[in-house]
Image: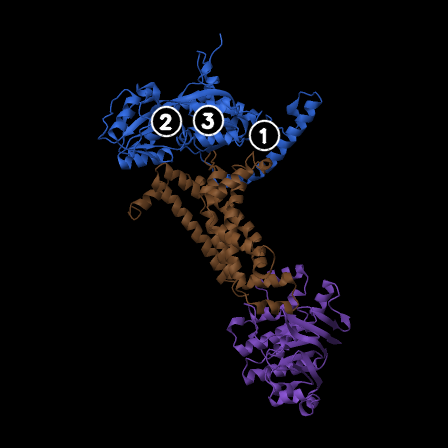
Chain colours: A purple, B brown, C blue
Amino acid sequence: MTLEATDVCYGYDDEAVLEEVSLSVNRGEVLAIIGPSGVGKSTLLRLLALFDSPDRGRVTYDRNEVWTAPERQRLEYRRKIGMVFQEPSLFDASVRRNVTYGLRVRQSWRDRLRHEVASLVGTQNGTGDAIDALETVGLREKATQDAASLSGGEAQRVAFARALAYDPDILLLDEPTSDLDPRNTAGIEDAVYRARNRGIGVAIATHDMHQAERIADRVAVLLGNDVIEVGDTERVFEDPADERTQKFIDGELIY
Amino acid sequence: MLLEPTLWPALVAEFPFEWHYVRSIIYVSLYVSLVAVTLSTLFSLPVALLVGFKEFPGKGLVTSLINTGMGFPSVVVGLVVLFGVSNQGPLGELNLVFTREAMIMSQFVLATPVVTGVSLAAVSSVEQNVRDAAFAMGGTRADVALVTIKEARYGIATAVLAGFGRAISEVGSVLIVGGNIVGPDGHSKTRTLTTAIQLEARQGQFETAMILGAVLVVLVLVVNAVVVRLGSGNGGRY
Amino acid sequence: MPYSNYNDIQSYFTVAFDVVSMAIQRRRFVTAVGSGAVAGLAGCTALGRDDAGDANGPEISGETLTLTTTTSTYHTGLLDELNAPFQDRYGVTVDTVAQGTGAALETARNGDSDVVMVHARSLEDEFIEGGYGVNRRDLMFNDFVVVGATDDPASIAGSGETTSAFEGIAESGSTFVSRGDNSGTHTKELEVWEATGVADEFGEWYTEAGQGMGEVLVQADQQGAYTLADRGTYLSMQSELDLEILVEGPIEDGPEMLMNPYGIVAVNPAVHDTVNYDLAMAYIGYVTSLEAEKIIRNYTSEGEQLFFPEAISEEPNFEQYVPEEWERNE
């Protein structure tokens, strides 16, 4: 089961950001996308998350073309993917409500209405998947707290749980730990492991190469407008095929 | 005059109106304004979402309309509605002249720009990241709209209250389209608190006008308090 | 104002019933008109028996009559007293819209009301001559008075003549507050000015308030100015004003010129076929009846009779049916 972008091109106005980029995310592995700031990692992830369609090229889910499929079907694909951004962007509600959001939107309107009424009346019960997700990030006890009262690190972990709660096949992370302290970073990385071990395919964009080294199975190097190198982590870092990769790792390349 | 200690007990003892008269005009005021504001909100929220988040031709025009509408002179609205529902007008068939429904129409026109404008500000301030997150988690466009509204709920509540305030304080247009009618039994058909106040004032009965004015103010305060209470109580965190 | 006693629950039901019955009313009215048209086409004369479900009484039961009238008729409370028996007898509702003479007639011209009751003969004549009104009847009269401050700077007190009083006010430059709102009172005031020699010589002393009688009296009171008022409104506010009657009206032996007659006219169904002509004629019939005459005559404010009915008379009064200048052909 693979989420794959093939020869995708994307640009804003006159500027091309990605040119003929191909990348695949497979279940049960962690893929790190590294490259300098602003090179287009977020853009690539947004294309993979099916936010926008590429100007040219294809995006396929399990070999099914996404953008030629009917909207209803595309929604189904989108719902198999989870995404966490650099900022937690939690809803102004309780942690529990945040985490169960993904589950709620997948219910029929009638069920949603029923649950909405139940929660207003006060007969709230934790949904199993939501509790599990919170467990994975180690924040189960904070379920009833206001999202606004969490620290930055806790909020990001809840954002992670939010994306996990509906059991996606693929998880896309856009520099999730850039704003976090080491302890919270470790918490997120731990959660990434657990997700991977559950069979989820994780793609994580990061500018922290050490993080890539720590947690990724494979690494893709995005430089200029293209993925110049993809391969097993160890190999890419120790014996890169492209000399630009070496320069980047050594910190020489500055864009 | 209002502070005379003998005034209030005397007024309560010899309240110049039958209670059922006052009750009927309160009922008309509330009925017309609440229905108008509800319809206005149902109309305004989608418009606010559209203007806030979508590009479309004529968007600038719509925004100008909203801003102009907020300060639009209410008597003019009354005249336009009267022309519309009059026998001579395009909606003459519906027999709406001098009815509460016509009053609802004019209050709808007055309240909508306010509700839309303030809601627009509220929903625009919802961060794109939050909307993206909702979308990323598998929400449809409708889901994202719902999330936006929920995130902006305090601003929207303010918008609705502002719209309600404008509606229930209306005199000129509801007078023109409603006709300030009360049945011989003292039962109000189209008389509101505001038009009743106007009636008493023009007859020189300023004290009774003030009493009705006090009732109106209390009513507005109560509605505001209820909405705020709902916001801070259960609805705030859920 | 005379409001009868209802208990609260009944009034809530009345409101709900009002809303629902108005909705049903319209449909029933349309059905009745529709089936009446069909029956008429078939040569059937039994118009009233089509609506099988209406076992309650006459066909017009449950309908609404829209009456536009002046603020002075309404404010005295006479109409509430007058309309209640009519409503009960026919099971209908009279919606009284107090708008002021000019607006009342204009609303009727637009077909938004069924019958008008005003007190400006020249405007009524204009209305009839325009073809908008039919079946005019004289209804009742009271009178106007000229009021002013006690110190009477223009010295018009006791003057038996309206025009000379007005001339006196103009010559002395004393402040005069006009209704300025195209009402019956305003129309009369302008007629008087026309009859004086000074209609074109208004100065700063002449102010137009553009408001109702009550407000104008308050304004005149505060400025110590003169104004023309209908006796009824003046009497009802007398205790709060320092103004005095300086020129009496015909009821108290003053000049005929200050007579204030009220007329009632139905809106011509030929111009607006949506007006409730049946009910308007039933109403005119009622208010010009013996029963109504009694109500009008007995209606008092502060112990004084406000209106003098003139609809019923042994002597024929053809002038009430036609515009005032109408010439009789022999």
Q: Nearer the viewer, residue A231 or A21?
A: A21
Task: Give me the C-alpha separation between circle 1 and circle 2.
Answer: 35 Å
Q: Is residue A89 visible?
A: yes
Residue located beneath label 1 in the image:
C274
Report x, y in % for residue A193: 66, 83
Q: Is residue C238 above or below residue C125?
A: below
Q: Quadrant of the C terminus of chain B?
A: bottom right
Q: Which one is closest to the eye, mark 2 or mark 3?
A: 2
Q: Which one is closest to the eye, mark 1 or mark 2?
A: 2
Task: Give SS at disc 3.
Answer: strand
Task: Give me the C-alpha separation between circle 2 and circle 3.
Answer: 20 Å
Q: Determine the residue located farthest toward the bottom in the rendered image.
A: A238
Q: Amino acid at mark 1?
A: Thr
Q: Amino acid at mark 2?
A: Leu
Residue C158 lies in quadrant: top left
Task: Give me the C-alpha separation between circle 3 and circle 1.
Answer: 19 Å
Residue located beneath label 3 in the image:
C117
Q: Is residue A192 above or below residue A98?
A: below
Q: Check residue C190 in the rendering and tell me which mark sits there, or answer none.
A: 2
Q: Nearer the viewer, residue B2 or B23?
A: B2
Pointer 2 chain:
C
Q: Is residue C260 above or below residue B174?
A: above
Give the residue drawn at x 28%, y 22%.
Answer: C164
